[in-house]
């Protein structure tokens, strides 16, 4: 087996298709060496089964990536908030924090949030409908809805939501200037500190309050609560915005897909799931570091190197999904990896699913003639962002 030293992430020509290189790699070099944007070597895993192994197997970790001498993906060390978050932990630290959050961030809490998500979606779409088309659906809906929902989840008081939304958007690197990003991240950190202190005095019905109120042998410290709030914001916000835009692009790209949902709204949940399979988050995949030498797919990966689990390749693996490049909301089984696998499986998956479904249902109902304002081939992939996705989504109605 040969190993290549291609620059990573691979070029892709369309926001709707993963890099063509993955088709070759899955067949010929399912575990291969690449050059990361930092200039350092890394490994990419492209078959569904191997990607699942990287995400599930404890020989691939996260915590070692936060050490000062660790290899980096882009040449920049992770900021302290990221380094302290559950996403950067291995067991047993991860198990402790995650189980405390799991106890409160339940399916029932998400169900209770559905009417609130619906109210926000109605407001945003009504506001959009009151203006003259075209509009950028990514700007109007995909950036606005997730931050409103996370504010509600964490119990940010309505009077603070605008500034919280502004800081979040900048800190999630949806705007560019590094100085601004840092200032916004600092403002959010201070705000979250104040929010936790306020909630301690005055508990509400939100997730932060529920975590503060946890009793028993173990509980979260104030610092852990602040980090947890920021983690949800930083990991959940940009991802949901970008993936929601890409899912809407997939559903609107072919008018017959959207018309089918108009006729049969009960198909929305399965259509959203299929759009998620075709549009996993991240431009390159999920990152791990080998905690020891590992043999995978017949290749020995050394200890202490970055391994990218390529979700977009795994979700198109013909060994796992028949006709993997086709959009088929009626797949009998759709175990895609867009929310990950194993111990770091997305904490906000149920919430993100609810947001995508509600966004689609609301658009179908309130703007029955919604369609793309450009040709699908004119939509641009956001190749320079870690998040990837469609740069903008012009629509008309
Ligand atoms: C469509 C939207 C979303 C997608 C596709 C998505 C995807 C993912 C993926 C793939 C992972 C695993 C990362 C890894 O294995 O390295 C993850 C983890 C995580 N997600 Fe999401 N996510 C979404 C929305 C959200 C939302 C709305 C929240 C919070 C409210 C959230 C919070 C988190 C957290 C905290 C983790 C880390 C969990 C851990 O390390 O145990 N995500 N997400």
Image (cartoon, grey):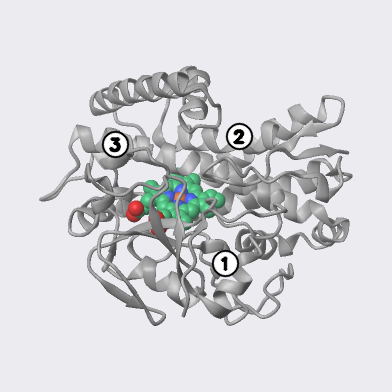
Q: CA distance from mark 2 to mark 1?
A: 26 Å
Numbered label attached to residue 227: 3
Residue lying at the far left of the rendered structure: 217
Give me the residue at 35% from left, 69% from top. Answer: 56
Tell me the crowding category of disc 2: few under 14, some 14 to 19, or many 20 or more residues within 10 angstroms, Cα based: many
Q: Which element is circle 3 on? A: helix
* Residue bearing the label numbered 1: 313
* Residue bearing the label numbered 2: 143
Q: CA distance from mark 1 to mark 3?
A: 32 Å
Q: Are marks 1 and 3 in contact (CB under 8 Å)?
A: no
Looking at the image, is 221 positioned above or below residue 261?
A: above
Give me the residue at 52% from left, 28% from top. Answer: 169
Looking at the image, is 314 positioned above or below residue 356?
A: below
Q: Which element is circle 1 on? A: helix
Query: Is the CB–ligand 1 distance for label 3 below 8 Å?
Result: no
Q: Quadrant of the C terminus?
A: top right
Which is nearer the N-term, disc 2 or disc 1? Answer: 2
Which is nearer the N-term, disc 1 or disc 3? Answer: 3
Which is nearer the N-term, disc 2 or disc 3? Answer: 2
Give me the residue at 79% from left, 59% from top. Answer: 261
Q: x%, y% of residue 322? A: 67, 80
Tell me the crowding category of disc 1: few under 14, some 14 to 19, or many 20 or more residues within 10 angstroms, Cα based: many
Q: Which element is circle 2 on? A: loop
Q: CA distance from mark 2 to mark 3?
A: 22 Å
């Amino acid at each position: 087996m040969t190993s290549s030293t291609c620059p990573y992430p691979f070029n892709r020509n369309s926001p709707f298709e993963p890099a063509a290189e993955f088709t070759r790699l899955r067949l010929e070099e399912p575990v291969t060496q690449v050059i990361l944007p930092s200039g350092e070597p890394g490994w990419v895993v492209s078959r569904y089964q191997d990607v699942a192994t990287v995400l599930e197997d404890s020989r691939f970790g996260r915590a070692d990536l936060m050490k000062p001498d660790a290899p980096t993906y882009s040449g920049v060390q992770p900021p302290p908030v990221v380094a302290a978050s559950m996403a950067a932990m291995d067991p047993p630290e991860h198990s402790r924090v995650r189980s405390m959050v799991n106890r409160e961030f339940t399916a029932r809490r998400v169900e209770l949030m559905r009417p609130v998500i619906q109210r926000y979606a109605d407001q945003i779409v009504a506001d959009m409908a009151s203006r003259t088309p075209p509009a950028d659906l990514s700007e109007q809906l995909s950036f606005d809805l997730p931050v409103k929902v996370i504010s509600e989840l964490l119990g940010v008081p309505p009077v603070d939501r605008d500034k919280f939304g502004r800081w979040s958007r900048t800190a999630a690197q949806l705007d560019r200037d590094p100085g601004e990003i840092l200032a916004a991240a600092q403002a959010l950190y201070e705000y979250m500190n104040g929010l936790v202190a306020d909630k301690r005095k005055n508990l509400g019905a939100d997730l932060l309050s529920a975590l503060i109120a946890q009793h028993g042998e173990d509980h979260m410290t104030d610092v852990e609560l602040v980090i947890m709030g920021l983690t949800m914001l930083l990991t959940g916000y940009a991802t949901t915005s970008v993936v929601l835009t890409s899912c809407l692009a997939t559903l609107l790209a072919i008018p017959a897909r959207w018309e089918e949902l108009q006729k049969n709204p009960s198909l929305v949940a399965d259509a959203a799931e299929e759009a998620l399979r075709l549009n996993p988050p991240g431009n390159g995949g999920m990152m791990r570091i080998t905690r020891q030498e590992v043999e995978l797919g017949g290749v020995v990966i050394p200890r202490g190197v970055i391994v990218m689990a390529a979700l977009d390749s795994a979700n198109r693996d013909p060994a796992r999904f028949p006709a993997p490049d086709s959009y088929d909301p009626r797949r009998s089984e759709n175990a895609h990896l867009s929310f990950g696998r194993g111990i770091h499986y997305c904490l906000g998956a149920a919430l993100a699913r609810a947001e995508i479904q509600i966004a689609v249902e609301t658009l179908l109902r309130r703007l029955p003639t919604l369609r793309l304002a450009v040709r699908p081939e004119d939509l641009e992939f956001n190749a320079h962002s870690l998040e990837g996705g469609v740069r903008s989504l012009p629509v008309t109605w």
